Amino acid sequence: MDFRLTDQQRELQDAARSFARKELPDLAREMEAKDFPVPADMVRRYGELGFLGVNLPGEYGGLGLGHLEALLVLEQFAMVSNAVAFPVFEALVGPVRTVERFGSDELRARIIPQVVKGEATVAVSMSEPEAGTALTDLATQAVEDGDDYVLDGTKRWTSGAGHARYYVVYTKLSDDAGAKGIGALLVDKEMDGVGFGQREELMGFRGIETRDITFDAVRVPKANVIVGAGGFGKLMSAFGLERCGNAIQSLGLAAGALEQASEYVQERKAFGKPIVDFQAVQLRLAEMAMQTEAARLLIYRAAANAAHAEDGLPSIYESSTAKCFANEIVRSVTANGMQVMGGYGYHKDYGMEQRVRDAFAWGIAGGTTDVQKTNIAAAIVGRRFDQRR
């Protein structure tokens, strides 16, 4: 078992780090202050440099590398901020992977090259006012009508809503109850009947738009069916990679907090010496480092093992373990970073308090930490738990 990165992986990681640290800190601060998404011209730069196609197929313009390579890139962007990393997240581990895995040849050829070039983004639209964790309670429905489906319903908590061009919409495609009736359509925001609610005001995630989406008799061509009715299990199988992406966004926050705090405590003096000389500070740094390294190993393991899996995706057990652990430790690591920085950590001009606010989001988004623990327990005992009985 070799924990060292290959030369190619290290070169890719270094390229992402160099670009992110040179080009993105000022943009990240402006996005945090003014709450706007990554500008379209910068997203295209991401694409030109290959950051949006790391693990997407070469036939569509991607680099055709593995999921670990994709996460190495995403981690470097997330160390600057989750907001500047979000287009990378959506391209490499997000809903475009559902299109790539289950969409038709025509749909893949139409959508993926746009994503790789940074010309369009794809968001996922899952949750509803009465269906969040209990996702099989969806009310949104698409009814077959000639060559189209007619889609009606309301979605909540869609990250990227209004900004993204395309949406992977989980919907009922038949009258069968629960998971048997659920599939997914690709919806273009330019389609008649697609509407967006008011921008949500969240504790963190500034620079990542979150809105309701309404579908009012939206005609979606059958060519845009990604997964048909009864394909809910397929949709969930692809979610293992997104869990790892969620986890790496948490890891980026934690790693960035550790780096910032480490630099600060060596520069800041009290009683005539750097505060890193005080044992209490050393203990906090050590705790932050242990938690960050443990999360990194869990995430990298899930991604590396996916290369040997039959479906090429991280397992539920390993991706849920990585996500849950990273989601929990990032809250501790960023809080400790704020504590050792004192007033500067609590001040908006220095960025640590932003890390603390953003840290709490990832343990809610993409399946709560408690849901991940249920997944882990189910994998241990070898059966799913029916939450309805």
Image (spheres, rainbow, N blue to C red):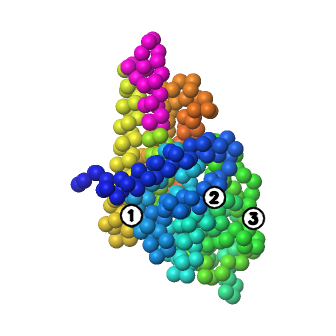
Query: SS class of the residue under badge 3?
Result: strand
Viewer-nearest residue: 40 or 317: 40
Query: SS class of the residue under badge 1?
Result: loop
Residue 195: mark in rendering: 3
Q: Which residue is mark 2?
A: 41
Identity, as a three-letter code, of the amino acid under mark 1: Gly
Closer to the observer: label 3 or label 2? Answer: 2
Closer to the observer: label 3 or label 1? Answer: 1
Find the magenta span and give its range: 257-278
Would you place residue 253 above or below residue 343 in this image?
below
Q: Earlier in the sequence, mark 3 or mark 2?
A: 2
Residues under labels 3 and 2: Cα distance? 25 Å
Looking at this rendering, what residue extends furthest in the top direction?
Answer: 271
Q: Main secondary structure of the magenta part?
A: helix
Label 1 environment density (alpha carbons within 10 Å; few <14, some 14–19, many ≥20): some
Would you place residue 373 above or below residue 233 in this image?
above
Residues under labels 3 and 1: Cα distance? 36 Å
- Asked whether residue 318 appears in the rendered view, the answer is no
Identity, as a three-letter code, of the amino acid under mark 2: Asp
Q: Earlier in the sequence, mark 1 or mark 2?
A: 2
Q: Is residue 167 magenta?
A: no
Residue 63, percent across and down?
43, 67
